[in-house]
Image: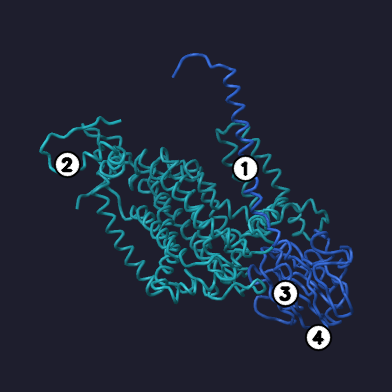
Chain colours: A blue, B cyan
Amino acid sequence: MSQEATDPSRRAWVGTACAFGAVGGAAVAAPFVASFAPSERAKAAGAAVEVDISALKPGQMTTVEWRGKPVWIVKRSPEQVAALPQLDARLADPQSKRNPSELTPEYARNVHRSIKPEVLVAVGICSHLGCSPTARLQAGPQPSLPDDWQGGFFCPCHGSTFDLAGRVFRNVPAPDNLEVPPHMYLSETKLLIGEDKKA
Amino acid sequence: MAEFKELPAGSPVTAQVTNWFENRFPTAFAEYKKHLSEYYAPKNFNFWYFFGSLALLVLVIQIVTGIFLVMHYKPDAALAFASVEYIMRDVPGGWLIRYMHSTGASAFFIVVYLHMFRGLIYGSYRKPRELVWIFGVAIFLCLMAEAFMGYLLPWGQMSYWGAQVIINLFAAIPFVGGDLALLIRGDYVVGDATLNRFFALHVIAVPLVLIGLVVAHLLALHDVGSNNPDGVEIKAKKDASGKPLDGIPFHPYYTVHDILGVSVFLIIFSAIVFFAPEMGGYFLEFNNFIPADPLKTPAHIAPVWYFTPYYSLLRATTSVLMPFLWVGLVLIGLSLVRPSRLPAMVKTTYWGLMALLFFLFGVPAIVLGWMGIDPGMKVLAGFDAKFWGVVMMGAGVLILFFLPWLDHSPVKSIRYRPSWHKYVYGGFVVTFLVLGWLGVESVSPAKTLLAQIGTIYYFGFFLLMPWWSRLGEFKPVPERVVFQPH
């Protein structure tokens, strides 16, 4: 290699050329990164779903699909609703105070986490790692659950448990209550899931 | 550049043809010598040295069978499951190609785990082979990515829910996690977009990186030379012509030797492909014969066996474990970092990090919780244990990168270490197997506790290595390798 001193002016040009090259590279990379985001079609598929719940009897539940996720509609009996506050001490977040803007719309920030006390609407996806918990609505001892089980939901993946209001118990892997999706009543027995009155 | 060589008239035709090519493509001849006919490998290689060449063989099997599967497979959420069944039932020989590919995935991990274990016990990652090891760990990471994305493609229930769970791991990262998971899926749940991109990454992107890393792994290995079961540098003793006294040319000696390994491997591999391709639900999980259903999670989700040790690290990290982890890190700091010769800045950073983790781990809230006090302040709760579970799982793999600098033993090979070191390694192997077993089981309090003990041993093994690897009475290392001709 040559022993000559470097020409600072040439170095400056080399540096400038590299800097512009890097900017160009980043600009070219942008559309590739952007292509990972949900497409317009995927976004459009998030439209609201209408459900008729007139046939749902107390103690029953039904599942509908919204944005590719299972949404549970559970009709609770008055006794089950009345029993909800008794569990508060064993729940991680009984008052739904954590991340309320994402998990619990204003009209569901109450003891029963719902608009009508007996009808729970919740996204059936565990707040731990996205499994769909199974309904264990019957009270009483059963496999994998505590003996004084009052009815609720059990996630088979990592053993998280939720009560009949989708509230998570303490000391289970799931950190948060089940999400209550935006929803509203179109009539006494017609639910619209995915939209509420604000929107 | 080599000189252009003319052979004397009347030379044999084969010599002339060889010479014609050598004059026009000398690189091919030079590289053949450098990597095969004149690559001197230690003559005392044992059983454990089969697995490097076997890993290469499995890579070739995966690439070849993969190319043929792509000819029939459809990466579309509506068609994928049926196209795999089409390969299994209607494509002539399709079932065999597919079973070779699915068995190959598990075989790859068996071979690579044994290959890594060899490196571990003979100190093959020690100076000057640190980069060989680091490239190797990078290959292992790529392999995990490759296996994970490949597992989504059959679009069965396990494919679907496994991907759902693992992608949601990224959502646990504070602040950016939700958006990151969305970018990976390309949809609000795992769907067609996810399947399509995983297909592209599985068949093109990751294999290219993988092959590049394998080349780097081998080139770096051939630059520094292979280690051996005695951990003796064969380059230290050379004959008059500069060849290592304890080295033999890779070709023909080890090529022929490895053919034995290949034969035994192929016998076992074929037996699995033909008689037990599902391997009792471990190589191909039963739930994956049910098409993906986004509305119904299978009763029991477990990753494929090769991920389960790391999955156990994830599940073991509950909020109960966090204060213990923090105390463990502080004890390591007091006993290893404080008296070490690390720069003062590193030490200060370590203690600053410990102070920060005290809060990020949520130690105050958890300890107050044990005392029955609810502080009621969200700031004391730190990040979710779920996030730390993800960190622990990642750290379980990434800690392997640092192995060359964690091991402070004066000798490389387990042969010349104090005998009790073998129990430490044995304990590590048992821990790894137990964590692997726990990872396929469903959770129970006793199993979680066992996984937590395993997690502490796993990390203790590595993080305390600078301390324990120096202890004990080391045996004298011979000048040359120990070898009985047979």
- Locate residue B194: give its quadrant: bottom right
How many angstroms separate mark 4 from mark 3 (CA)?
Answer: 22 Å
Where residue B404 appears, as percent x and y from the top left, is 47, 42
Amino acid type for the residue under numbered disc 4: Ala
The mark lying in front, picked from 4 and 2, is 2
Residue at 42% x, 43% y is B216
Circle 4 residue? A55
The mark lying in front, picked from 3 and 2, is 2
The mark lying in front, picked from 4 and 3, is 4
Where residue B305 appears, as percent x and y from the top left, is 50, 65
Circle 1 residue? A28
- Locate residue A153: give its quadrant: bottom right
Residue at 80% x, 77% y is A51
Give the secondary structure at mark 4.
loop
The chain letter for the residue carrying disc 2 is B
Circle 3 residue? A153
Answer whether labels 4 and 2 touch (C-beta < 8 Å): no
Q: Are marks 4 and 1 on the same chain?
A: yes
| Mark toward the start of the polypeptide (1 vs 3) | 1
Amino acid type for the residue under numbered disc 2: Ala
| Mark toward the start of the polypeptide (4 vs 3) | 4
How many angstroms separate mark 4 from mark 2 (CA)?
Answer: 90 Å
Amino acid type for the residue under numbered disc 1: Val
Circle 2 residue? B15
